[in-house]
Structures are given as C-alpha cells and as structure tokens.
Amino acid sequence: MKVVIKNWHAIAQWRWDTGSNDPDDADGEGDVCGICRVPYEGCCPSCKMPGDDCPLSALGECSHVFHMHCLLQWIGTAASKQQCPMDRRQWVTAERKVDSTRS
Amino acid sequence: MATTALTAQIVLKWQNSFARLNRGQPGISGLLSFSEAWSIATAFLRPRDLADTTPSEHNMQDVRASFDILSRSKMLPMLLENFLEDMRKQLYLITRDINTMMSQYENTGDPQYIASLVYRLVEWFQAWSPIPELGYTVISAYKLAFQTHVFSVLPPSFSSGFKDLIASTFTLSYSTSPPSWTMGPSSSEVKTPPVRPDIPLWTAYDTLGLLDRYESLISSVCYEHIEAHVLETCTGKWGEPMLAPLREWMADKVVPWMIMPYARGARTAAEAQSMLQSVGSRFDFHVCKTLSDLRTREIFDIIIDYPDSLSALQDLKECLQRVDQRTQLVATLRKANKRRLLHPGADTKDILTQYVSIIRCLRIVDPPGVLLFKVADPIRRYLRERADTIRCIVASLVGDGESGDSLVDENEPIQPLQQMQVEDYTDPNWEPEPIDAGPDFRTNRPSDVISTLVSIYDSKDLFVKELQVLLAQRLLAITDGNYERERRNIEILKIRFGEAALQVCEVMLRDMTDSKRIDQHVQSHESLVLHPTIISRHFWPPLQTSKFIMPGQFKQIQDNYAKEFTAFKPDKRLHWLPHLGTISLEITLQDRTVSAEVPPLAAAFIELFSEKDTWTVDELVNKIGSIDRSSALKALATWVDLGVLKEDDNSQYKLLETADASGSGSRTAAPRPANIMEDAPAVLTVQQQQAEQMKVYWKVLHRGNAHKPRVTEFGPDTDDAEDCSGYDRTIEQLGAFMEAARREGLVTVKDGVWKLNRQ
C-alpha cells in the first residue's frame, strides 16, 4: 500500500523563539512580558497586532525578554538607568543563540 | 231635600248646557241640528271591519259641517271618547289578523309575513284614522290608542321577525327586481315603482310608530350587518388596506340605507347629513372596532406574515387611534406568544425571527413603542434563559449562509449599537411618554433591531466572545483561502460593536492573510503539499488540544515546513495542532486506488498500516500518542467505511490489499461500534470554555477538604471561594458549577450547604 498526500490543510500556532523556552511546553500558557504582563505572543498595550508588528526584544544577557516596545519605553525613561526592570542589571543585549542553530 | 239654592244651581247648569248645544238658535232647532251632526260624525268615525266591503258613503261636506257644529258645541272630547270606545270594541278584528299572520310567520320563519302584517296594520290604521280636520289632539290620541293596542297584542316572536325583515332590507334596497311582497297594497295604485323597493316598508313602519319603538333593534341589525360584512371581507386578507374600502362601502351602501330609519323627513341633503352625523359616527366607530377586534385576534399570524401583511398593520394602527383596544392587543399578543412561541418546542431561531417581526410590526402600529415594550418583555426574559440565544443572534448577524433569511434587513443602514438614551428635555420636539406607558417604560425610539436584540443581555461582551468562536470555526474550515465573506462580516460588525471590541477578530483575519503569504513564500522555496493556517494563539478562542505525533511521511513534511518557516521568520517557531485540519489522500492498493479527504488522525492511522497490515486499536493508540479511544475508533471507522480496513474479531484491524470478496467492503462491517459521535468542533464553545475554567476551582474544594478533614462544608455565601486568588466568578456561576458537580455525584447538597461526597 502506498499513501500519497495530495493536499494537507493543517493548523499551527506560532511561538516566539526565545531560546530558553522548553520546546515541549506545548500547551503551557507561555511566559508573559515582565513589563506589561501580556503574553509574549500577545501584543504590548500600544499595539493592536501581534507578531511581526509587535516583536520581542532581543534576549538580554540577564536572560530576560520583553516586548520590544515595552522595553524601549522603559529604557527611554530616565528612571530606568538603562537597567533591566527585572533584576536591575545593566541591560545588554545577548548574542542570538537561534542564529547559530539555524543554517 | 233640595234647597232652593241647589235647585237654582241645577237650573243654571241645565240652561248653560242647553245654550251651548243650541248655540243661540231659535227654539230647539240648534239642539236638533246638533243631534243630527252627532249621529253623522259618529257614523263616519265608526271603525269598520276591513272585510266589510259595503261602501260607506259619506258626504264629506255634511261630515265637515257636523264636525264644525260639534266643535262649536265643545263636544269634541265627548266625540273622541265615544270614538275610542267604539274602536276598543272593534279591536278584536286587528287582533285576529295579527294572530293569523304571526302564526304563519312562526310556521315558516319567512319575514315576508311580517311585511304583510305591517302592511295590513297600516291598512287598518288608515281605515280608522279620523280626518285631519279634527285636529292634532284627536289624531295623536287615536294613534296612541291604536299603537298601544297593537304593541300589546304583538307576540314576542314579532321582534325577531321584525329584525329579520329589517335585515332583509339591506339586500332589498339594492335589488332591482324586488319580490312582490315588498310592495304595499297601495303600490298597485302607484304606477311608477319607487326608486328603492324598501321605501314602502319604511313608510309603513313610520306610520305605525315601529321605528321609535324598535330603534335599538334597528341599530343592532345594522351593527350585525356591519360585523358580518367586515368579517366576510377582511378575515385573513392582510395584503391590502381594508379600512378605506370599508368606509367606502359604508358610504355607498349603508348610509343610503340609514337615511330611511334615521333621516326620514329630511328635505335637503344638508339636513339629512346633520341628522345622520351622530348615528353615522357611531357606525363608523363600530366598523373600526370590529376591524380592530378581528386584527387583534389575528395578530400573531399577521406578524408571521410580515411584511406581506403591512396593510393590515396600517389598518390596525388607524383603528386603534379611534378605538381604544391597545390593552386587548397587548393581552392577546402576549397570550399568543406564550402559547405558540415561548415553549420548548420552538427553535430559538424561530423565536428570534418572530421577535424581530414583532418589533417591526408593532413599530408600525405604535411608533412610540409602548405596545412593543409591553409585548417584548416576556419574550426577552424567555430568550435570556435560553442557552443558545447568543449563538443564534451572532449566527444571524454574520449571515448564516444556507438558512438565507437573516434577521437583519439588508436595506437597514448599519448603525453602531445604541445605548440607552437619557431623555433630552431641551429637545423642542420632545413629547411626553404615551399615557399607557408603564413606569419602567424606556423610550428607545430610534434603536434598530440589532441593538434591541443585543440589549436582551446586559453586556455585549458575550456577543463578541460568541462571535469569536463562530469566526474561528469558519476560518479554520476554510481551505481555499477565500474568506472575503468573513472579512466583510467583520467590517459590518465593527460598525455595530466598535473597532475595539472586534480587535481580536481583526487579528484572526490577519493571521489568515499572513498564513497565505508565508505559505506562498515557503512553497517558492520548497514545494510541499502542506498548507497550514498559522494562528496567533492568544487571539483565537481556545482550541481543542490533543497530543499525538503524526507518523512517517507526515512528520517529515511537518518538519520540512517548520524548517522553511523558521528560515523565513528566524525568531518564530511553529507549533502544530496535529488533530486539526484535513488531509486529502490517495491510497494505492493492489487492485484499486482510494481517494479520501480525512481528518489528520485517520491519515496517521492509515500511514501506520503501510508499516504492517494488522494492528490492534491499543497498538495504534500507543504508537500515535495520547488520544482517547473513542476518537481512535472513529478514525478507523472512516477507513472501514471506505473499504480499506476490515475489523477482525478481538478489535484487530486489517488492511485490505485486495477488495473484500465477501460483498462490498463498505457494508460488511457490522453496525459500527457505538462511537459515532457528532464531529466535535475544533473550537471550544463559550460554555465549554467556562466549564474548563471552572475546573480549576475544583482543586480549591479539595484543598478545603484537606484543611478541614472532618466536615467539608461550603455554603454558597461563605468566603471560601475567595481562597482562590483571581477568583472572578459570580455566585450564579459557582452555583451552576456546584450543581454540575452534584449531578456527577461529587458533592451532596443539604440545606444550602455542599458537602464533598466521600466514599
């Protein structure tokens, strides 16, 4: 017997690749942005569309991730002193791990 | 012993009388002429039997002269008394006639005998009538005596006979060839027949004073005539305005008839008009009342027929302005709704459709909406209790495709939902609420149908949620990438519910577009048969989850696609929802090929069969991952039906490389195991979502159990529920949850306190 697939309409969800995510965390609620408390796959309060329109910030060296817009707004305020809002360490963007796994 | 004074008095009296009778004539010649005049007059006036045909010859000159003499002698009262006495003696003749004719009528029931009776009475009346020279007093005394007698003799059956006769005059007054009995005896002398055949009858009634005596009877005949006509012409005819034709009919047919009983003796048209005015308006009122009664009885069906019954509604509106039947209308409609609409047998969709029709119809009848408010209240309360009301409303909002008739009128402008308006008293056109408005009546005059429907519920969030579920179901079912209809619907609904409320739907639609674009990109790099819809999970309603892994080539394709996707969007990964979607397959067997479009689970199974020919259900389930047995059986049944697999004993399935020889493979399989469930929709309904969410709180109950091992009691109003941070359910929801738990035997309830059921 031979099974030939002619057409396959499937449903999939997209997830941000934060690198730290456990790939088996299939139906976990997912992490939330530490600033706006909205899930990463949601969108920050100033956005309406999730995904590419409201991306995540790059991973910080402290391994924290936020919505890009949330982080920029935070960094932009004087009180932030350029620190990560979670642990008060200087915010430094880490090298992307994903890039190395790809290609 | 007579005194002299007395004697003198008597003498004086005598002389006075003598002088009066003798009228100052010489000797007693005056007395003689008086006595002659008396005998002529009494002979003339004597009531004769009509049957007595001997001609009575009177020299009218002599008669008049005698009356003159009597009048001068002031003896007319005596004459009248004498005459009436004579008449009384002769009355038995009339009684005899009446009895004969009435018995004829009673035997046949034919009103023409009444007519003959009337004419006969007229003959008697005229034959006995004194000449007009005797003056009004005599005539009226005669008339009174005659009528008193006639009325006292007429049997009770006369009234009904008379009524029939009057009723027959309606048709009579237009007939061109009237039956001969309508002609009075006098008509033989009249050469030209009267303009209307009923005129002689009316004249006769008038002569006998029947009109005054039976006035109420005559008007009741007219009422009945009107009622019969209205019922006959208007019942069930809702397509055309009836009130105007009815009024025309009144003017054409009834008014001319009315002239006879109500405007006799009117000399000019204007005079007749003024005489008819009051009675005419009474009859017009009756027309309106009959029509509005009729329409009130029919109102439920009229509403069903809307908009074909528009004219009937306008008639009703006009009638209600004249007749105060509004409360009856409300009562009737409420009763009809309760009996025919608000019962478990009626579809929610039908109830909604009828409700919308009621809204539209009562707007026509009563623009301020008081009637609607009163009628709608029970319907709204009932709808609120139905579980699927919101779903129905939402389904009709987005146009349910097949069913066709949407609740929303296409022509109606799309408006934003209207909130309750506070009355604006500075509005120069402000009008007070109608007089019969209840205390809780709210003027929501200009609101459209959808706003009214949505306002059944307190918040529109429920609608948005339901809408999201519905949209998700539809979008996920779309395989050809054509979702223009959904986009259009969402655009329309945005106008109604506002952009913000539908933001989620907007994201769902964009996911569809993005998926298409991504797919095009991926396909350009590596042509794959897989075309996924990639969704943003927080913006879709919760989907049914299951974990299984597609085997063999399916897994391969998924992985390939995921790789291409990540290459295109480096910061994103794909997470497959393996049980959703459809796969179109072609299976090449030794002797045949089978094409099928199946759910992924079925595809996964058949893929496994390419590894080996025989599997048990448990083996399959273990291989695939975590799926429940019933859905596994269902997926296998798909292939059994297609004749690809065969169910052996002990729940083994075998691949049929060659078609089953023992008859068509599709039917050998004995009745399918009882697993044929309705296709579980991919999207959880709002209720299911809520139930899922409530399950969390089940843990709280058990925690309570741990805290208080001896008695575990939760009253609905204790604060235990607040143990759980973020608890945001209402008491009602908690109650429903506990009730569900009780049904499953997990808790018992006693005196409003729930107890864990520990066995």
Image (cartoon, grey):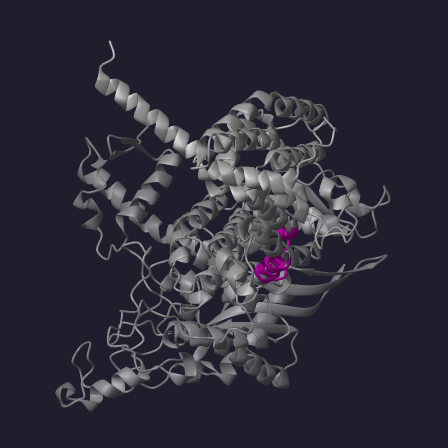
Q: Which residue range is magenta in the image?
A: B233-252
Location of residue A35 in the rendering, given as x and y in whole percent from the top left corner: 24, 77
Of helix, strand and loop, which mostly describes the magenta segment? helix
Residue B746 left/right relative to B547: left
- Is B526 located above or below residue B652 in the figure? below
Location of residue A97 in the rendering, given as x and y in whole percent from the top left corner: 38, 81
Instruction: Write down the quadrant of residue A37 in the picture.
Output: bottom left
Q: Residue furthest toward the top?
A: B1
The question of residue B429 being in magenta is answered with no
**For the N terminus of chain B, which image quadrant?**
top left
The question of residue B247 being in magenta is answered with yes
Question: Residue B662 or B232: which is nearer the viewer?
Answer: B232
| Residue at position x 58%, y 52% in the image | B258
Location of residue B722 in the rendering, given as x and y in whole percent from the top left corner: 20, 50
Residue A91 visible in the displayed image: no
Question: Residue B225 or B118: which is nearer the viewer?
Answer: B118
**For the C terminus of chain B, which image quadrant?**
top left
Residue B339 left/right relative to B370: right
| Residue at position x 37%, y 33% in the image | B745
| Residue at position x 51%, y 84% in the image | B568
Location of residue B346 in the rendering, given as x and y in whole percent from the top left corner: 54, 46
| Residue at position x 44%, y 49% in the image | B386
